[in-house]
Image (cartoon, rainbow, N blue to C red):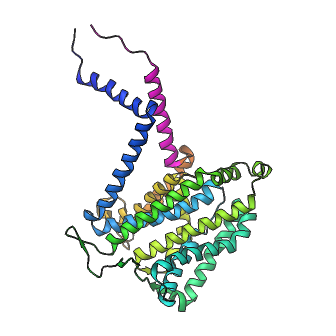
Amino acid sequence: MSEPTPTAVARPLRSALWIALWSGARPLRAALCVALCVAMLAAAVAVPFYLEGFWLQAGLFAMSAAIGAIGINLLTGATGQLSLGHAFFLAVGAYSYVFLSSDLGLPTPLAAVAAVIVAGVSGGLFSPIAGRLKGAYLGIATLALIFVGQHILFNAEPVTGGFNGRPVPPMELFGLVFADTPELVVLNVPFGSLERLWFLGIALLAGAAAFARGVLRGRPGLAMNTIRDHEIAAGVMGVPVARYRAGVFVLSSMYGGLAGVLVALVFQQVVPDYFGMLLSLDYLAMITIGGLGSVAGAVAGAAFVSLLPQLLTRYSDALPLVAEPGSGGVSPAEAARILYGAAVVAVVLFLPGGLAGLAMRLGRVRSKELRWAKSAPAPASRR
């Protein structure tokens, strides 16, 4: 009788392991998910000890973009309301934090919370329109917010600083200042503003994602999806359509305000040019690439869209067809927009569910394979 090869032994063991994890042992699967989350958290905590400032700053921008993308995904992806004015609420959050902390002298944590509330109030003032319009009509109406916001930011110089913007006061929480001074050393690693803000960004992103996930998995999420898919049926079932649309618009605005506060803390300077129409289009690209109506998809899409320009800028010398900024060729920012514009087209044509939908599809394929492997008869032993 011939001896089995290592590959022949490994394959049944691997299949049996997958079957045990995903088909029959729910406690084991839950334990695996918990272990994976703990491992990811440990890796995220370890990042500031090993990576340089560029990667920390890029990661923080991705975190702020993910928070804003989760908010716009609740509105556009889950409820079906098109918004082109999300950048306006980021500006409201960023500038409100600067004004409340610098001019009014509020403690920075209180100023950050108040800035998020101000962004929500701004969304509430617009919510009667958001509750009655839908589709392209709402998109055009929210586009007006960008032009109004840009006009205010450039002309209200005593409050906004005009074209040059304003410096951002560092956050001070429980005696810890999120700045380069005073000096802080942890395990022989100097912790500057980026290292300190990294942990704040993780906490804010985790809280924002957990809250949005709870909303989508509960009764509000079911009502939002019903409004998106069958508005008339939702009304017949007793769902207050206009009230839900207005409420989700306010919630999305608050997410935008929180993202604006975080990006202001990372930039350390707020300027009007950043909060333009291109930023709103970037957020629509994020949720389209990542997957409409998915929290994980919003995070993945935000990471893709926000990190791509920075990576192209950093490695422009080694990449073909990408020139340094100002050299006359295709700049990294332009190349990034071309690439994720092509990604949007590819997602619309071939992956309607985005990256999240692709992950779910692969998971279903794997589940079918496991069910087939479990139900298939055992092969006859070799002699």
Camera-nearest residue between 249 and 23? 23
Q: Is residue 250 above or below residue 358?
A: below
Residue at point 36%, 67% (across, down): 198
Provide the residue span drawn in magenta. Answer: 354-383
Camera-nearest residue between 315 and 327? 315
Left/right of residue 33 with respect to residue 80 in the rendered view: left
Position of residue 135 measured from the top left corner of the image (x, y, whole percent): 70, 59
Residue at point 64%, 71% (across, down): 123
Quarter of the picture containing the N terminus is top left
Q: Is residue 63 above or below residue 350?
A: below
Quarter of the picture containing the C terminus is top left
Residue 91 visible in the snapshot: no
Residue 348 visible in the snapshot: yes
Q: Could you tell me how many numbered marks the image carries?
A: 0
Q: Residue furthest bottom?
A: 158
Position of residue 246 measured from the top left corner of the image (x, y, whole percent): 69, 65
Residue at point 39%, 32% (across, down): 18
Camera-nearest residue between 363 and 302? 363
Position of residue 121 measured from the top left corner of the image (x, y, whole percent): 64, 75
Q: Is residue 330 above or below residue 117?
A: above
Our reading of the magenta stretch's main secondary structure is helix
Whether 368 is among the magenta residues is: yes
Whether 66 is among the magenta residues is: no
Camera-nearest residue between 63 and 358? 63
Position of residue 96 measured from the top left corner of the image (x, y, whole percent): 54, 81
